[in-house]
Structures are given as structure tokens and as C-alpha cells.
Image (tube, rainbow, N blue to C red):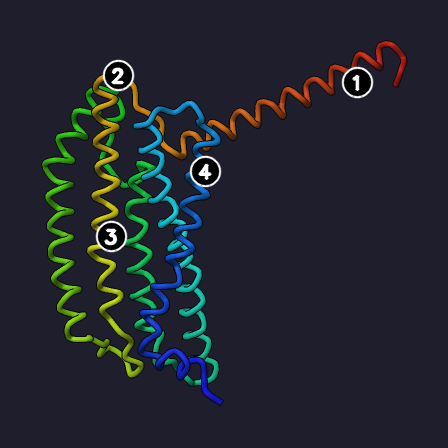
Amino acid sequence: MQSVFDLIGGPRQLTLYALLVPIPIVVVAFWIELLGARRRAPDASGIEQFLFAVDALSTAVGKTFGWCIVLLTFSTSYEVFARYMFGAPTDWAFDASYMLYGTLFMMAGAYALSRNAHVRGDFLYRAWPPRRQAAMDLVLYFLFFFPGMLAFIYAGYNFAKLSWLMNEYSAASPSGPLLWPFKWLIPVTGAFMVLQGIVEVIRCVICLRTGEWPQRLHDVEELEKVVLDEAEHRKEAGMAKAEEAGLRRGDV
């Protein structure tokens, strides 16, 4: 009977299949996020819908590849258990560890940017009015972010293309998984970052014009949660008042 590895072309092909599996998951997650945003903010303008759509894409990608941390935890734990309990170390755990962590780190970048969650020294920035914040962000995006990301895409593309032409395999372990599918994530990550960066620039321009930061996708989600919580509190308060009124009348 053929093993699973034989059916997919050997363990070396596993990298390629592992990167193809998340694609339909990302598509489904994207539509769920986008439809949820439209339901929460039905009166949003066309530009706001575009901002929410890109936020939804970044969120879908980040949340899908976020599951890499579960796989990384499992593979590392299995390696430690097999090595020290049975003296039978695996030949794939090392490659799996840097591929899973690298994938998680890169593919979550645009998601973190969409939530304004990247680390920044904001001890002065947070005290500024919104227009000054937007002006500073706009300068930094064009001065550092876009040049850096475009260089990242260019270098990453050449790096991945060379690996693909060589049909490169890892020499770090006996299992030797394919490396070029993993390396193609570098320019893909850069493309997602540039797309989210364009959205952030649009937000800066809107803030410069209006004096207020436009909503993000997670702001809409949090607002919906606040509204639901307030409705629940009002319901509980109404029930408490009705019960109190009933006690006063001697109905309860």
C-alpha cells in the first residue's frame, strides 16, 4: 500500500501542498470578513468600503496563517518528545520550525498593519492631534515604508525566482523539503504590505481633510460589540425595574 507521502510525490513535495491548502481558506475568510463589515456599516461610502475590503483581506490572510503557531507548537513538542523519550529524532522538525515561523511572521505583517499594531515609539506621537499624526505617518510611509517594501518585493522576487529555477531543496536536513514555494512568500508578503500601506495612506489623507481618523475594520467590529453590550445591559436593567415594580405591587 502506498504511503501518503508516495501519493503526493514524496515528503519533499509537502512544502508545495502545505502552501496551496490555505488559499481556499483565505478566500472564504475574506468574504466572511467583508460581508460582516458591510452588514455592520451598511451606510459606508465607496472609499470606506474599499478600505474595509483591504482590511478584510489582510485580516483573512493573517488569521488563516496564524494557525501556523499551532502547527509549530505541535511539531516542536513532538520532536522533543520523540527525541528524549524514544531516542528517535525526526528528520523534518528543523525545516518545519523555520518555515512555519517564517510564514507566520511574514503573512501576519499586513494584518498587524491593518490593526495599527506594529511597534512604534509613540510617547510623543500619541499626544499629537490627529492631523499632525496623519502628516507624520504620510511622510514616513513615502520616505521609508514604500521604498523598503518595494525593495523587499524586488529582492524577494529574484531570490524566489532563482530558487524556483534551481528547483531548490533544503540541505539543512535529510528530508530536504522544497524551498522555492516557501521563498515565494517573500514577494507575496511585500505585495500584501504595499496594498495595506496604500490603504493607510488613504486614511492619512482623509484624516488631514477631516481632522479625524476614519474607522478601521476592527473599529467597526468593536463598535458592534459595544452596541450589543449596551442593548444587553438595557434589557437587564429593564427586567430589574420590572421585577422591582412587581415587588412593590406585591405581584412577586
Q: Left or right: where does residue 68 sit relative to residue 120?
A: right
Residue 43 occupies quadrant? top left
Residue 248: x and y, percent?
84, 10
Labels 1, 4: front one: 4
Packing grade of label 4 (10 A; few <14, some 14-19, many >=20) is some
Residue type at the position of mark 3: Thr
Q: Left or right: where does residue 205 sit relative to residue 61?
A: left
**Residue at x 16% of width, y 47% of height:** 149
Disc on the earlier residue, 3 or 1: 3
Disc on the earlier residue, 2 or 1: 2
Packing grade of label 3 (10 A; few <14, some 14-19, many >=20) is many
Residue type at the position of mark 1: Glu
* Secondary structure under the numbered disc 2 in the rendered image: loop
Q: Left or right: where does residue 142 sit relative to residue 194?
A: left
* Secondary structure under the numbered disc 3 in the rendered image: helix
Residue 105: x and y, percent?
30, 54
User: CB atoms at circles 3 and 1 under 8 Å apart?
Assistant: no
Q: Nearer the viewer, residue 187 or 232?
A: 187
Q: CA distance from mark 1 to mark 4?
A: 40 Å
Labels 4, 2: front one: 4
Q: Which residue is mark 3?
A: 189
Packing grade of label 1 (10 A; few <14, some 14-19, many >=20) is some
Q: Which residue is mark 1?
A: 243
Residue type at the position of mark 2: Gly
Q: CA distance from mark 2 to mark 1?
A: 47 Å
Q: Nearer the viewer, residue 49 or 250?
A: 49
Disc on the earlier residue, 3 or 2: 3
Q: CA distance from mark 3 to mark 2?
A: 31 Å
Q: CA distance from mark 4 to mark 2?
A: 28 Å
Q: Which residue is mark 2?
A: 211
Q: Which residue is mark 4?
A: 35
